[in-house]
Amino acid sequence: MRHFPPLPQVFHLGHHAAGRHRPAHHGVVFWLSHAALLLALLLIATEVSAQQAGDLKARYEQMAPQLAHSPFQKPIVLSSVDDTQHPTGEMHAVVDHDFGALAGALRDADAWCELLTLPANVKKCVVDDEARPSTLHMAVGRKFDQPIEDAYALDFRFQVVASRPDYLLVEMSAAKGPMGTSDYRMTLEAIPLDARRSFVRLRYAYANNFAARVATSAYLATTGRGKVGFTIVGHEEDGAPRYVGGIQGIAERNTMRYFLAIESYLDTLPAPQDQRLDKRLRDWFAATERYARQLHEQPLEEYLAMKHKEARRQMAQAAGE
């Protein structure tokens, strides 16, 4: 059950410090002044949201040629920042979902928990509705099966910053992450384009301290050797594209995984409840395999077995609480 803070006490029935009774109209003035302040803040927030919606629409119009000729064979544009201390990936995309359905789903913290567990390295996600704001308690680890106690905790504060008929802004943030990473930020914005399409912007960023950069360098020199992102930085002698690597490649791969998770979640909402998980897993895996050079990690059956096991474990833990 969601709990709300008590309403402020408008009328003070006690005494002033000097011992005189507070006139009743003082309580009314206090309430009216606070109501006026709240109204002003609401109007400012509405104005800001309208400006943000307009900015996103302008960005769509500016990016329309790129979206129409995307190398991904669908209207998406992926970009990243070459910064080892603050890796950042950003996705702009047109999705075949009407804005009402999209916003109705993605302003729900539970929906994000369901879609964020599609990537192989996310082992668990539970929403704490008692926290203010709501918190997503996640466990992240290897891309293969592992005991939950060996995973790292990652707690995202979840906020719906704006929710209008023409604009949605959702933000998630985590102060600390695994292996020296910190200041995680995931932001989703969306606007309607027409009766069946929406335009979304997904931004994913985090910070690496010195220890995290050392650990990442070790990963890229061993297990992650040969891993690449999506941005083409040149061509080989035979004409094959050469893709960005390093931490920039990591940011691009993660951004793509999360975007495909959002799409798979929305695509499977019409399916019967008892079929959604398996369909969602299969759809997400199939989507990642379209970019196997960057995203392939394991065979389908191995991925499905691992994810169904994790889902059963989470359900058992919830039932035992």
Image: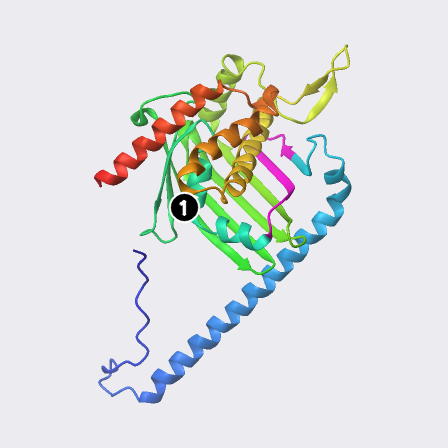
Report the side of 9 relative to 242 (left or right). Answer: left
Image x and y of residue 50, in percent? 62, 61
What residue appears at the point 41 percent right and 22 percent down from the top-left corner? 142
Q: Is residue 117 magenta?
A: no
Q: Nearer the viewer, residue 9 or 313?
A: 313
Figure quadrant of the C terminus: top left
Magenta part of the chain: 79-98
Q: Position of residue 60 (x, y in %)?
A: 70, 48
Question: What is the x, y in percent for residue 198?
Answer: 63, 49
SS of the residue under disc 1? helix
View extreme (front): residue:
272
What number of labels is visible? Answer: 1
| Res 7 → quadrant | bottom left
Residue ID at (41%, 42%): 273
Residue 23 position within the rendered picture, expressed as x and y whole percent measured from the top left: 31, 89
Can you say whether 311 is above or below 156 in the image?
above
Answer with the quarter of the image where residue 67 lies.
top right
- Residue 279 visible here: yes
Q: Quadrant of the N terminus?
A: bottom left
Q: Is residue 82 magenta?
A: yes
Amino acid type shown at disc 1: Asp
Residue 141 seen from this side: no
Q: Residue at x 70, y 32 (%)?
A: 73
Say which quarter of the image contains residue 150: top left
Badge 1: residue crowd in 10 Å (few <14, some 14–19, many ≥20): some
The correct choice, above or below, for 225 with respect to 294 in the image is above
Residue to which mark 1 is pinned: 110
